[in-house]
């Protein structure tokens, strides 16, 4: 049986007219161990089938007694509608352990620039609170794009933090409506804002928002000369179909998987994703998005070579160390050894 957490909804707190935060506690009384910026993958039942949804945690272990995630209503989104309209305090949720690599590292000692849009503020809010809790932490800048001041998640909390930490946290909002000077955080405005950081030593950028928004931001920052490994991005809610496998990709391989102290062996047919083959063989590996976007399925390749059709989360450094995503990973060699967890 996979490691599944049983969580009780301790409190539900409205954030805006169309969003709520869900505060959680483990039913076994133990604290939930996680890093700021990570997410929970919920295992939900919908129309008789298991549905997985990954939600970033907005809490920080240093500042929040209970972990929480925030849900914003999505047009035609059955899961978000159920959570906002039906889920109540005291209900139980089941989740995989917190995961994700959208976290601060020991190398993040220079200026940290957070670029958020909409509910993408959630993991960034966690990172901001965690960093501010460190007395000698770096200076932080938040560029936050939102539809309307009254629909901006965590706005009051962010304003309070900026007032509490002058010189440590600068927040700039970009509202498309509801102000006398509406503006959208587009490539022109981002380039203008980021120009002030070119002379900074070792700046780091953290992006979270809709996919098109993050793609725009990353292209702008790369064009301005910021290195790729200084730019991290995270999908707030991950719903991705398994990508199609290009013709001719992948060879048949004998794969050994080291997981939970056991070694499992299987033959993976040519053109089959490693995760799909493992699940079909009864090896209950962790996963969430199945689209190369979240890192829940990450494994370390100890022998052989794996090619990913999609990778929106692993950095060049992580891939050089051997990390691969099993959900979009295809065997390139006939012998492969993977270590999971």
Image (tube, grey):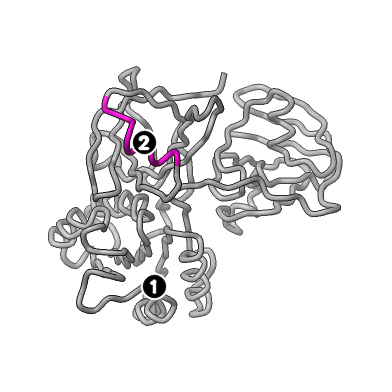
Residue sitting nearer the eye, 339 or 328 = 328
What crowding class fits label 2: few (fewer than 14 Cα within 10 Å), some (14-19), or many (20 or more)?
A: some
Residue at the limit of the structure toward the front, as seen here: 76
Give the quarter of the figure containing the C terminus: top right
Magenta segment main secondary structure: helix
Q: Is residue 212 above or below residue 41?
A: below
- Please tell me whether mark 1 sits on a helix, a strand or a loop: loop
Q: Which residues fall within the magenta stretch?
A: 78-89
Q: Position of residue 55 (x, y in %)?
A: 42, 42
Q: Is residue 48 left or right of residue 209?
A: right
Instruction: Say which residue appears at 16% left-offset and 65% top-offset.
Output: 166
Q: Residue at x 22, y 53 (%)?
A: 135
Q: How many marks?
A: 2
Q: Which residue is mark 1?
A: 201
Mark 1 Cα shell of 10 Å, populated few (<14), some (14-19), many (≥20):
few
User: Can you give x and y, in whole percent of width and height, for residue 297 in the image?
Assistant: 59, 39
Residue 127 against residue 82 in the figure, above or below:
below
Q: Which mark is residue 135?
A: none
Residue at figure coordinates x 42%, y 65% from the top left? 205
* Viewer-proximal residue among 95 and 296: 95
The Cα atoms of the two marked residues, 2 and 1, are separated by: 43 Å
Judge from the rendering whether residue 45 lies leftward or rightward of residue 165; answer left or right: right
Label 2, on which residue?
83
Residue 152, given in percent of the width and then of the height, sits at 26, 58
Question: With 154 as the anchor, is 219 left or right in this view?
Answer: right
Of 112 and 86, nearer the camera is 86
Name the foreground residue: 248 vs 296: 248
Rendered-image quadrant of the N terminus: top right
């Amino acid at each position: 049986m996979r490691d599944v957490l049983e969580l009780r909804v301790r409190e539900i707190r409205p954030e805006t007219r169309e969003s709520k935060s869900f505060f959680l506690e483990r039913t076994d009384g133990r604290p939930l161990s996680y890093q700021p910026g990570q997410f929970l993958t919920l295992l939900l039942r919908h129309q008789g089938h298991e549905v997985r949804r990954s939600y970033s945690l907005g809490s920080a272990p240093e500042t929040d007694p209970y972990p929480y995630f925030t849900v914003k209503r999505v047009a035609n989104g059955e899961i978000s509608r159920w959570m906002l309209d039906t889920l109540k305090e005291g209900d139980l949720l089941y989740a995989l352990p917190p995961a994700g690599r959208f976290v601060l590292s020991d190398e993040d000692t220079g200026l940290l620039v957070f670029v958020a849009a909409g509910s993408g503020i959630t993991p960034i809010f966690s990172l901001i609170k965690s960093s501010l809790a460190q007395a000698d932490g770096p200076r932080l800048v938040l560029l936050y794009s939102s539809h309307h001041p009254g629909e901006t998640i965590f706005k009051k909390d962010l304003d309070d933090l900026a007032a509490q930490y002058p010189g440590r946290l600068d927040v700039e909002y970009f509202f498309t409506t509801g102000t006398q000077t509406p503006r959208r955080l587009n490539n022109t405005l981002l380039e203008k804002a980021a120009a002030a950081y070119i002379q900074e030593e070792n700046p780091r950028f953290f992006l979270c928002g809709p996919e098109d928004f993050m793609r725009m931001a990353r292209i702008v920052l790369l064009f301005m000369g910021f290195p790729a490994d200084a730019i991290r991005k995270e999908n707030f809610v991950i719903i991705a179909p398994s990508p199609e496998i290009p013709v001719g990709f992948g060879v048949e391989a004998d794969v050994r998987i080291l997981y939970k102290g056991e070694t499992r062996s299987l033959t993976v047919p040519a053109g089959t994703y490693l995760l799909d083959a493992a699940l079909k063989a009864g090896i209950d590996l962790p996963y969430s998005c199945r689209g190369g976007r979240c890192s829940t399925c990450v494994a370390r390749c100890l022998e052989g070579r794996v090619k990913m059709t999609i990778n929106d989360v692993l950095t060049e450094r992580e891939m050089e160390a051997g990390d691969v995503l099993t959900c979009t990973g295809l065997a390139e060699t006939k012998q492969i050894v993977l270590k999971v967890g």
